[in-house]
Amino acid sequence: MKFSQKRRDRFSKIEPWLYLSPFLIFIIIFTLYPVINVFTISFKENYSYLRGTFKALNFENYKYVLTDDKFTSGLKNTALYVLFVVPVSTAIALFFANLLNKKVRGSAIFQTAFFLPMVTSVTAVGLIWRLMYNQQYGIINWLLTKVGIEKIGWVTESRWSLLALIIFGTWNILPFTIIILLSGMQNINETYYTVARVDGAKPARIFFRITVPLLSPTIFLVCIVNTISCFKVFSELYPLFYGKPGPYFNLYTVVYYIRYAMMEKRKYGYAAAAAVILFLCIFVVTLLELYLKKRMGRKGLK
Amino acid sequence: MKVRIDNVTKKFGNTTAVSDFSAELEDGHLICLLGPSGCGKSTLLNMLCGIIPVTQGQIFFDDKDVTKLPPDQRNIGMVFQNYALYPHMTVAENIAFPLEVLKVKKDERKARVEEIAKLVHVDNLLRRYPSELSGGQQQRVAIARAMVKKPQLLLMDEPLSNLDARLRLEMREEIRRIQKETGVTTVFVTHDQEEAMSISDSILLMKDGFLIQSGLCQELYVNPNCLFVAEFLGNPPANKIVDDDKITAIRPEAFTLDPNGIEAEIQFISEMGKDQIVTMKYLGNTVRAILNLDDMVSTDSTTVSAGSKIKVGLKKKGVFTFDKEGRRLS
């Protein structure tokens, strides 16, 4: 079959869109549409999802959410979670990545061991951690009694629950952080270390004066990615307290609040407003980190 | 400082990188470790540095056995092929790093950095980052960093191979000048015989892990102990003429125009300054000779070009004969 020049021209204009369309359609339906929808719903007072009706367009949802104790304490818990998990996990990951980067016998075994949590389900691991946290029979309390510390009600007392969540969250995020930092370290030219060793620099100095500065772009990257994922903490919380936000409903997080507003309270407007507030928090913090990266980033590193 | 290398051998598994190497390096000399790539010269340098342990044999700095000492206790400076300047530190911080490790006080550190920076002509670049420097400037900074702690021995691993031709010539002279001014014993690794001839006091010529010949530059050129040395040194390389029982190596400059000489047919002429490199058929072999054909043209009044026949003779200097194994006969 022969096509005229004109028809061929028209086809070549459409062609790229044809290739893009499967992905574009997917993105529009499952990402773009929901995002826009959440924004609009957050301004609709008394929105009914099934009927699509609402009373008025205003800030009532935001007013309610921002004065709800569950949400404000959730925001505080989430902020504390981010504030501890991100720096602590980065520091621990730096230490382990540095060890894993050394060419020692059996390092492949260690690498596999460290990366294993990444391919396991958070929920399954969370249930195991709940057992480990068990006040009477848990391995953590057993170890603590060995060094003379009294048994702690990690997941049964409200004052320990946030710490339990932070420890589990840190552990859970480590493999990803280690992988990223390790791959960054492996990109550092070996001769930098050789030069430093010829000059007699000790491992600690090499680590802080050479490895860390050369790795700083990767460290910033991993901090930003982890901050975003920590703000959305939920799947770590859910199995640890059997679906409750803490033993006495004391440990709401922002995402847990969104779930609660939507699934239990059936208030879609509140959930949407909370989601938008979370988005703004993440947005501002990420901008702050990018600004810090620009200011603190070493000039020689491009 | 004098360096003595005593029967040093290095094995990586079953392969021998350096075998039974012995040499003495004179105090204050610039010594070139020369050889084709893969001959073990970098391995030897790394053993002098202490980065690679020695399998067998000993290394002495003056009279001290340093074979087992780690690099930082040998008081050496090292310049790498890719310079390895820390990209996140300024030039001043880079140069000061070895002093920082030695816990030299800040004031003294600053003074010594400035002093060495002046010597290598980077004193106006101290606040810059390595990425803002040209290749030659980075090279200078790398030398300054290696020299700042006043090492007894300076080691350079193919320091010029990352530079373009013009800069290479400039830095060659600079390295020579800096070495002369400081008087530090320097070992310089290169595979470029021309570079080695022009920069060094003496040469250690290596092949397949063995030391083939050592001595002053001219000594090796004028008096090669085997065919390999005769062929390796010199540009264009010496011509090899194989007979039944011997091999003759003739340096291109050993040919002369001689009316009573042997006839040779010119195949190709390329200009080289005032002389020409003439590729010609000589006794059945294709050889390259450095001749000045202009003299001939003026006396003979015929133009010489490809296809012309000329008569050439040989000077005494620059003609060597070897047996079939490449051992020197005369």
Image (cartoon, coloured by chain):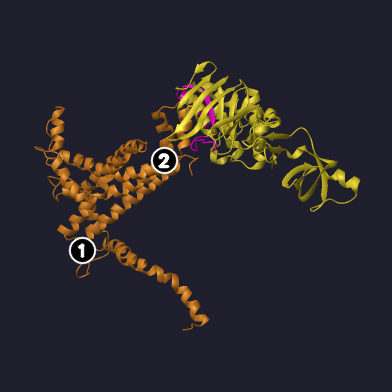
> Is B231 left or right of B303, judged from the image as shown?
left
In magenta segment, residue B73:
yes
On the image, numbered disc 1 is attached to which residue?
A: A46
Against B75, is B281 above or below?
Answer: below
Crowding near the residue tagged with mark 2, few <14, some 14–19, many ≥20 C-alpha atoms within 10 Å: some
Q: Which chain is yellow?
A: B
Residue A296 vs residue B29, the one in the foreground:
B29
Mark 2 lies on a secondary structure that is: helix
Q: CA distance from mark 1 to mark 2?
A: 48 Å
- Identify the colour of chain A in the image: orange
**Are the numbered discs 1 and 2 placed on the same chain, yes or no?**
yes
Residue B275 vs residue A130, the one in the foreground:
B275
User: Tag on residue A216?
Assistant: 2
In magenta segment, residue A212:
no
Mark 1 lies on a secondary structure that is: loop
Q: Tag 2: residue type?
A: Ser
Which of the two labelled residues, at mark 1 and mark 2, occupies the earlier sequence position? 1
Which residue is found at the position 35% from the left and 51% from the top?
A283
Q: Chain of mark 1?
A: A
Observer-side mark, 1 or 2, equals 2
Q: Which residues are magenta?
A: B69-97
Residue A216 vs residue A125, the one in the foreground:
A125
Percent coordinates x, y for residue A292 in the rendering: 41, 42
**Residue B52 visible, this orientation:** yes
